[in-house]
Structure formats: structure tokens, C-alpha cells
Image: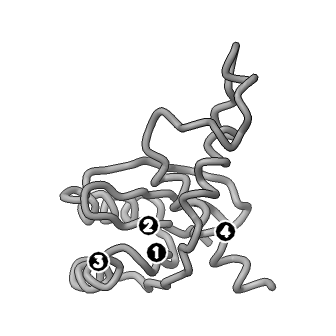
Amino acid sequence: MMIIGFDPGRDKCGLAVVDNYKEILFRSVVDSSRAIAFIQDLIAKYSPSLLVMGNQTTSKQWKTQLEDNINLSIVLVDEKNSSLEAKERYWVFNPPRGLGKLIPLGLRIPPEPIDDIVAVILIERYWQTQNP
């Protein structure tokens, strides 16, 4: 079962595709104006069974737009504190090097957007609700 994770935003959106083995097959941050077309491409490429998206920032608007443009079940999940979790997870995907290792985790700031990591976390939260 493939799932698309979608972290909607006003300016940029995070996207991820994760399979039932919890392997991340795709993740990217895209401009909001291109998000629906990008999701359509991901659907064509991966044939996911559903799309999981955050329930806060602009989610109602996005859900309506998605329902009008894609033929896929959409599930809203709690995205509370997902950005904080993604900041920490960033360093798992991109371990610091050199002097960066000396900076405490709580003080490190990712040098790039982390919306794609939030999308992965939203999928994980969906799975937790399915297998508590």
C-alpha cells in the first residue's frame, strides 16, 4: 500500500511517498502553485491507495481543491508539532559534519525547507492510528 503524504502550505508544500514497508520512495518540497500537478504525477507513477494530509494550515482549502482534481481518498491527520519533529528528523537524514556535530540538537537549524519530512511524519501518524 503506497501513501502520499502532503503537508499543505500557502507558499510551499511538502510531499512524500511511502510504501507499506515504510520505505520512503520520494520526498520533495514544491511551490504551492505546482502542488496539485505534482500530486497528479505522483499518483500516475506510484498508484497510491490514499493521500494523508495535515489538518491545520489551509487544509480545508487544499482538501476541496484536491477533491476536485484527484481521484484518491484523502485522510486528515493531526499535524500538531510535526514541524518541530521534522527539524529533529532532518538531522537523521542529513547528519551534521565537522563542527556542526558540536551544536546541540535543539539549537541546530536545518538549512533547507523541511516540509517533505513533515509529509513523512504525517504518514507515520496515520499508520499509528491504524495500528495503535
Q: Nearer the viewer, residue 89 or 33?
A: 89
Q: Which residue is mark 1?
A: 53
Disc 4 or 1, which lies upstream in sequence? 1
Instruction: Looking at the picture, tell me which residue is in the foreground, 61 or 105.
Output: 105
Picture residue at 36% right of the left edge, 63% below the top: 44
Secondary structure at numbered mark 1: strand
Q: Name the secondary structure under disc 2.
A: strand
**Cβ atoms at labels 2 and 3 below 8 Å apart:** yes
In primary-sequence order, the first of circles 2 and 4 is 2
Q: Amino acid at mark 1?
A: Met
Give the percent coordinates (x, y) of residue 17: 52, 59
Q: Amino acid at mark 3?
A: Trp
Residue to which mark 2 is pinned? 6
Looking at the image, which residue is at 51% across and 61% down? Answer: 119
Residue sticking out furthest to the right: 132
Pointer 2 or 3: first along the chain: 2
User: Type of residue at label 4?
Assistant: Glu
- Tell me: 11 left or right of 94: left
Residue 58 picture location, percent across and down: 31, 76
Quote the CA–CA distance across marks 2 and 3: 10 Å
Rounded to the nearest angstrom, the CA distance separating label 2 from label 4 is 12 Å
SS at circle 3 = helix
Q: Which is nearer the N-term, disc 1 or disc 3?
A: 1
Q: Does 75 appear above or below 39?
A: below
Contact (CB < 8 A) between labels 1 and 3? yes
The residue pinned by badge 3 equals 62
Check disc 2: other Cα within 10 Å, few if <14, some if 14-19, many if 20+.
many
Question: Could you classify mark 3 by the number of other residues whose Cα lies within 10 Å: few (under 14), some (14-19), or many (20 or more)?
Answer: many
Find the distance from the CA under tag 2 to the CA under tag 1. 5 Å
Q: Which residue is mark 4?
A: 124
Image quadrant for the C terminus?
bottom right
- The residue type indicated by label 2 comes to Phe
